[in-house]
Amino acid sequence: QVQLVESGGGLVQAGDSLRLSCAASGRTFSLYNMGWFRQTPGKEREFVAAVSRSGAATDYKGSMKGRFIISRDNTKNTVYLQMNNLKPEDTAVYYCAADSGSLLSRQENWYDYWGQGTQVTVSS
C-alpha cells in the first residue's frame, strides 16, 4: 500500500505560479513512477505529467509542456508539480498517483494508488 497526500493548491491569479507537492508513505517510493492528473466538474480526469522512478524521464501533456515541471525527491518521498503562468483553464482538482509499471503511462487505469486531490483555482 502507498498513501499519497497532495498539498499546495489554492486560489491564484492568471499568470501566477504554484508548486504542488505529493507526499508518499508506505511502500518504497522509488519503486513507483509518479503522475499528476487533474479533473474539472463534468469532465473526465486528464493526464498532466509523469516522472520515472529515478526522475530521469518525464512526460507531459502537450498543452502543459513548457509551463509545468514535474520532479521528485526520493529522499523526501515527494513528487512535485511546478505550475507557471497559470491560466483560468488550469482550474481543477489535481491528483497525484503512483504506478508500479515499468513504463511511464498517461492512462489513469495503469496507476495503482491515488491521493485525495488538491484544488487549484485560477482567476482571470
Image: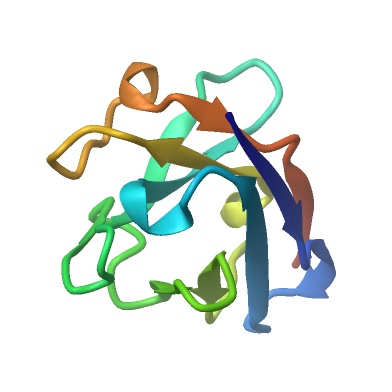
Taking the spot 22% from the left edge, 37% from the top edge, the residue there is 105
Specify whether 124 is left or right of 87: right
Q: x and y percent of residue 47 in the render?
A: 38, 39
Q: x and y percent of residue 43 in the render?
A: 56, 20
Q: Residue 76's quadrant in the figure? A: bottom right
Q: Residue 87's quadrant in the figure? A: bottom right
Specify whether 40 is left or right of 120: left
Could you say which is closer to the camera, residue 6 or residue 92?
Answer: 6
Q: Residue furthest right?
A: 11
Taking the spot 73% from the left edge, 41% from the top edge, the residue there is 117
Q: x and y percent of residue 70 in the render?
A: 40, 69
Q: x and y percent of residue 57 in the render?
A: 16, 66
Q: Is residue 93 above or below residue 77?
A: above
Taking the spot 28% from the left edge, 59% from the top edge, the residue there is 53
How many marks the image carries: the answer is: 0
Could you say which is closer to the camera, residue 121 or residue 37?
Answer: 37
